[in-house]
Amino acid sequence: MLANVSGLMFGGVMEASGSCMETPEASKAWFAVRTRSRAEKVASLQIQAYGIEEFLPLYQTRRQWFDRVKLVSLPLFSGYLFCRCDRQNLVKVSSASAVANIVGFGHMQATVPECEIQAIKQLVMSGLSASPCPFIREGTTVRIRRGPLQDVRGRLLRIKNQFRIVISIEMLSRSVSVEVGPEMVEAI
């Protein structure tokens, strides 16, 4: 969330504050990488080629062409991927041709809290149907009590008699949602 930036400095990198409270690892942190238009997968391969850990969360969706329907993989956060590295390797990441920039505030690259990345990884690995949704600043914060997303926290949203939990990357003001049964969540 842009308005909620802490003034704490960690090795010259500013950390965006959010709902996760933890101290970043001294040598490596997660950063959000803005890619060139529709170049998320190319940027992912380029960052991997540098030997840097990256994470490009994808979801499956059906796309209709005039002659066929095809299942395609698209980024959950259009225009973004994440990389985990130390400050010195951000220069390598920035030099990749498919990378537009490292997300930050002013001239400082901002870190993404580890717990937000872990929640998105758990969502992707769960096999549940997820999709991008509008970022939600207000709403009840909930925790999933059981199932493949047990202990994941997010905001509860109701759309046409369906309950969805919204998991957000605060710094990017982007969110993804997944359908859950109301019996699976509890308010925090």
Image: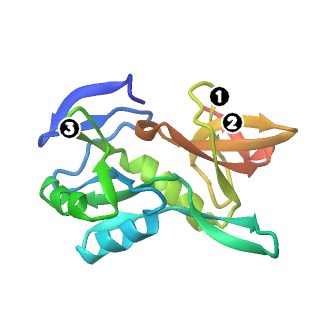
Alpha carbon separation for disc pair 1 and 2: 6 Å
* Quadrant of the snapshot with the N terminus: top left
Residue at the location (26% across, 69% down)? 52
Residue at the location (39% across, 56% down)? 36
Residue 133 occupies quadrant? top right
Is the Cβ of the residue at disc 1 closer than 8 Å to that at disc 2?
yes
For this orientation, the residue located farthest to the front is 66
Residue at the location (19% across, 56% down)? 90
> Could you say where residue 100 lies in the image, as x and y percent from the top left?
32, 53
Identify the amino acid type marked 3. Answer: Met
The answer to which of 37 and 108 lies nearer the viewer is 37
Identify the amino acid type marked 2. Answer: Leu
Look at the numbered disc 3 and give the secondary structure of its residue. Answer: strand
Compared to residue 22, the image places residue 65 above or below, namely below
Alpha carbon separation for disc pair 3 and 2: 32 Å
Looking at the image, tell me whether mark 3 or mark 1 is earlier in sequence order.
Answer: 3
Look at the numbered disc 2 and give the secondary structure of its residue. Answer: strand
Q: Which residue is under mark 2?
A: 156
Alpha carbon separation for disc pair 3 and 1: 32 Å
> Could you say where residue 62 lies in the image, as x and y percent from the top left?
74, 66
The answer to which of 76 and 101 lies nearer the viewer is 101
- For the residue carrying disc 2, how many other residues have a C-alpha within 10 Å: few (<14), some (14-19), or many (20+)? many
Compared to residue 125, the image places residue 20 above or below, namely above
Looking at the image, tell me whether mark 1 or mark 2 is earlier in sequence order.
Answer: 1
154 displayed left or right of 88: right
Q: Which mark is residue 72?
A: none
Compared to residue 47, the image places residue 182 above or below, namely above
Q: Which residue is under mark 1?
A: 140
Look at the numbered disc 1 and give the secondary structure of its residue. Answer: loop
Q: Which residue is under mark 3?
A: 108
The answer to which of 157 and 46 lies nearer the viewer is 46
